Amino acid sequence: MKPASLQIGAAKIDITPPVGCDLTGFGAREGPSLEVRDPLFARALAIKDNRTQAVVIACDLLGLEAPFVAHVRGAIEREIGVSAQNVMIASSHTHSGPACMFLRNCGDVDAAYMAQLAQRLAQAAREAWDALRPATVSSGKTQVSGVSTNRREADGPLDEDLDVVRFDDSDGQPIAAIVGFTCHPIASGSFHRSISADFPGVLTQQIEAAIGATALYLNGAAAQTNPYFPGASLDFSIGNLEIVQRIGETLANSALALWPHLKSSRKSTLRVRARQLDLPLQRVNKKSLESYVNEQAESIARTAGAQPGEVARPQYKASVARLEWAWETRLTLADGTAPKFVTAEVQTLQIGDVVFVAVPGELFVELGFAIKQALAPAHAIVAGYANDNIGYIPTRASYPQGGYEVDDAYRYYGYLAPLAPAAGEQLVDAVKELQRPSRK
């Protein structure tokens, strides 16, 4: 068998929507977009060795739904021959991008934009494929503190790893970089109705300017991780554009400081595996549902006159969304079509010593740690919001604590109930199974 010969190609394409589109991510946001603060991009990496081909696309978007991803994967397979299951499409989770998936009362999806987006993602894959050339891979990580905080627990866990993967051509010149960091891109806030990639946009643009090559950003297990910067206040209803800039710059400077110290991979083979699994949902308590309907109706009555900018307005909008969820749930239970599972895909893409783990939603940071530990000594990088966005995937221990991520967020994502407490562990086990050595 010939030794593996790694080839890498990269491309970058603008996916900025038109001004006037609905933005998504914040229920409290009032009205459509008013301007473009910074453009949104899809960055693609084509990967090939003697036996396998793959494509990774990183988008400045909140998230994409599985049917849309399947459509784009199919187009890429037809266009360049890469197997659909070997395509990974991840989103940064910016809350200042266009509505591109269902999120209750958080903006309407524009079908025309989505059709154009599908074409552009396939085009990015094609351009990256056409740019394939022999390459080497090196990687490393460093810790970046002081730019993130655990929003559920004051001293709760944080994943402060900044992961950097470098691809060079045969002359030692950069072809592309992948940078991973775990944090919600929400520092722009809901008040600013501007299209923006948030801090990942600053991060990638500064790295690209420094290395002269394409830089992809992958978010991690960011469920309960928010941005933070010492000495700067951040009210997410208002946002803080200074924090957007400073976090992006801090991460970019840390990545560039690490750049010359990355270690070459001992091997350069490519392997991609994927698996679908059914994550169980909790049962809906019909009696509690009726009480919930009454609570939300009363809340709407109390706040019905609230105008944009008033304190009661976000409460009113949230109650409308929750009551809508309750009515839909009632109907689903009545006609017997209530689902018991959420279908999810996990995917692993290994290039030499580095393993990218695609997770379809908002994974709790502890589950991200579990994946990294399980795959050691490989350099595991979790790619959240990848190939789908099913919402929050909590730890078992978080359920008694409750909170938005456990008790409420699923309603905005359109599910009848939260995931069962075992779902997170089931997902981690599936990743472990994917990475077990093949039996031959």
Image: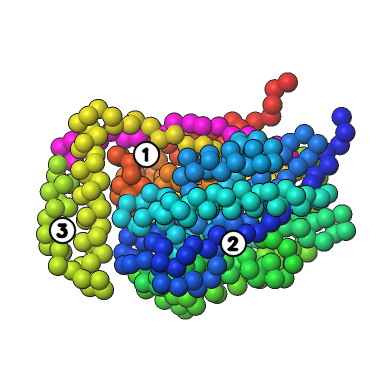
Name the amino acid type tagged 2. Asp
**Picture residue at 64% right of the left edge, 38% below the top:** 78
**Picture residue at 36% right of the left edge, 58% below the top:** 107
Task: Judge whether residue 361 is colored magenta.
Answer: no
**Residue range (magenta):** 270-289
Callout 3: SS: helix
Q: Nearer the viewer, residue 265 or 202?
A: 202
- Relative to residue 14, is residue 135 drawn left or right? right
Q: Characterize the local packing of mark 1: few (<14), some (14-19) or many (20 or more) Cα atoms within 10 angstroms.
A: many
Q: Characterize the local packing of mark 2: few (<14), some (14-19) or many (20 or more) Cα atoms within 10 angstroms.
A: some
Q: Which residue is mark 1?
A: 419
Name the amino acid type tagged 3. Ile
Q: Position of residue 66 (x, y in %)?
A: 48, 41
Q: Position of residue 196 (x, y in %)?
A: 49, 67
Q: Which residue is mark 3?
A: 300
Q: Position of residue 177 (x, y in %)?
A: 70, 58
Q: Nearer the viewer, mark 3 or mark 2?
A: 2
Q: Which residue is mark 2?
A: 14
Q: Is residue 375 visible?
A: no
- Relative to residue 123, is residue 282 drawn left or right? left
